[in-house]
Amino acid sequence: MKATHVKGKDRGHIFLFALSTCGWCRKTKRLLQNLGVAYEYIDVDLLKGKEKTEAEKEMRRWSPRTSFPTLVINDEKSVVGFDEARIREAIGI
Amino acid sequence: MKKIDVEQKEIQALYGRLDKEAEASGYHLNPDEEFAKDLVRSLLINEKRYGYWACPCRLASGVKDDDLDIICPCDYRDADLTEHGSCYCALYVSQDVLEGKKAVGSIPERRPSAEERQKREGGAPSVAVSSLSLPVWRCRVCGYLCARDGPPEICPVCKAKKERFERFL
Ligand code: SF4
């Protein structure tokens, strides 16, 4: 999966499963940007075929119904949905 | 998949239409106009991408039959409005939210998983209806009922298309 990198402070590996069309995903990206942390994201709706299926499969580990946005931190915890307090807590900011 | 562009005037036109239709039937668009217009833009993108208004906040399969329940307005909007004050994307909000009595936020997904959805398919009405002179059709989006030979072209209440109706009785 080729993710987009956004530069910022290193706060561990922060990975966002998003949709290019979703309002809550946009808010999540904006929050991460404002927090100034480095993160990676993929817009799953822009993927095709095998790549899309793979991303969905990977996502299901964290969000069984593949709800967006799903934020995964250090491959160990996740926050599903745009919840500013929980996102801050998970990142430790 | 390449980026799809939508013109500002298309967004404006659809936003105006949805706002008018919503208000006429007791629904409301999110008063955060920028947020709502971003979602309207997404509906237009999805229309170009899939041929229908797939919900902007859900991953569409691209197969219309499998996405019918998440064509905007989706089958889950009204229940979410009642329970959470907004639809999943927060394009539509309740009166309380409109009046500022309640805040909107990300809400849990109500749409059942693909497996669960498949199981629910094909549940024909079980009530004995032989006494009815006409079948009764139900709009899956808003619950509107009508007794006629077939469902209407569009729901007079929520404007959902014919294919969103089910045989109720
Ligand atoms: S009504 Fe349903 S499909 Fe439309 S924006 Fe809201 S959640 Fe998405």
Image (cartoon, coloured by chain):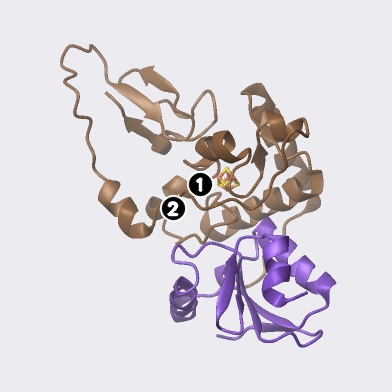
Chain colours: A purple, B brown
Foreground pick, B39 / A24: A24
The amino acid pointed to by label 2 is Asp
On the rendered structure, is B14 left or right of B146?
A: right
Q: Secondary structure at mark 2?
A: helix
The answer as to whether callout 1 falls within 8 Å of ligand 1 is yes
Which residue is located at x 49 percent, y 74 percent?
Answer: A59
Disc 2 vs disc 1: Cβ atoms closer than 8 Å? yes
Which residue is located at x 40 percent, y 38 percent?
Answer: B163
Q: Is residue B37 above or below residue A20?
A: above
Q: Chain of mark 2?
A: B
Q: Quadrant of residue A57?
A: bottom left
Q: Is residue B145 above or below residue B123?
A: above
On the rendered structure, is B76 left or right of B121?
A: right
Q: Quadrant of residue B164?
A: top left
Q: Position of residue B93 (x, y in %)?
A: 66, 37
List the residue tagged with mark 1: B71
Q: Is residue B114 above or below residue B155?
A: below
Q: CA distance from mark 2 to mark 1?
A: 6 Å
Q: Is residue B31 above or below residue B152?
A: below
Q: Secondary structure at mark 1?
A: loop
List the residue tagged with mark 2: B67
Q: Quadrant of residue B84?
A: top right
